[in-house]
Amino acid sequence: MGSLTEKSKAIIIGCVLGDGAMRCKKNALLEVNHSHRQKKYVDWKFETLKSLVNTPPKLRKSGRKRVAYRFTTRSLPVLTKIYKRFYKTGVKRIPPDLMITPLSLAVFFMDDGCKSYNTVYLNTQKYNMQSQRNMMKALRKQYGIIARINRDKKYYRLRIAVGSLGRFKNAIASYLLPEFKYKLP
């Protein structure tokens, strides 16, 4: 597997920005893991990425109550390139020169977005401040979307400015799956 389609790459980057996790020994793999209630969403991701996967998604119990639906790609050199961009120091970060396609942004939002009254948040609490600034810069530069760092208890996340919500919606509209429209005001 020497290269990815543009669609596969965009979905992988959206996953990595969101709930996806990568691991790497010699080559990297991507784990897609959501609640079993998001089976349709996991299946949608799998359909695009199935050429990178040996085993289809499966239900998996973790703990007493959580039932996940997940799949993992094979370890591949093409994924290692992405891993090295996002896990340069072994910790997930947002690269300073991130180019985020509308599809990647939509996947990120479907994974980690939520609405709040008349705007939306990107739940970036797992990222350090520099990564969050990198995302703000990418959104502004590529889409004219203004985002601010917003305190969420002891962590921080990105809030899309109300005046930029239209641009944000326009960027992701054609990729947002119907079951995630509830995340938009």
Image: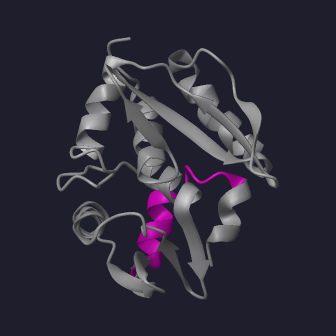
Residue sitting at 48 percent across and 54 percent down? Answer: 18
Q: Position of residue 47 (x, y in %)?
A: 63, 27
The residue lying toward the viewer, choosing from 80 and 154, is 154
Which quarter shows the C terminus?
bottom right
Q: Is residue 164 visible?
A: yes
* Residue 48 covered by magenta stretch: no
| Quadrant the N terminus occupies | top left
Residue placed furthest toward the top: 1
**Residue 165 forms part of the magenta stretch:** yes
- Residue 180 left/right relative to 5: right
Q: Main secondary structure of the magenta part?
A: helix
x and y, in percent, of residue 46 in the image: 62, 30
Q: Residue at x 42, y 37 (%)?
A: 22
Instruction: For residue 173, say whether it is visible.
Output: no
- Height in image: 78 above or below 88? above
| Left or right position of 108 against 98 | right
Does residue 106 lie above or below 149 as drawn? above
The region drawn magenta spans 164-178
Q: Could you tell me residue 7's position as x and y percent?
A: 45, 33
**Residue 125 place in picture, x, y as percent:** 43, 70
Counting every numbered tag in the picture gives 0
Q: Residue furthest front?
A: 63
Q: Quadrant of residue 12?
A: top left
Q: How is the image coloured?
A: one colour
Residue 6's place in the image compared with 100, above or below, is above
| Residue shown at the point (30%, 68%) measured from the top left | 132
Q: Residue furthest left?
A: 97
Observer-nearest of 155 and 52: 155
Judge whether 100 appears above or below 28 on screen.
Answer: below
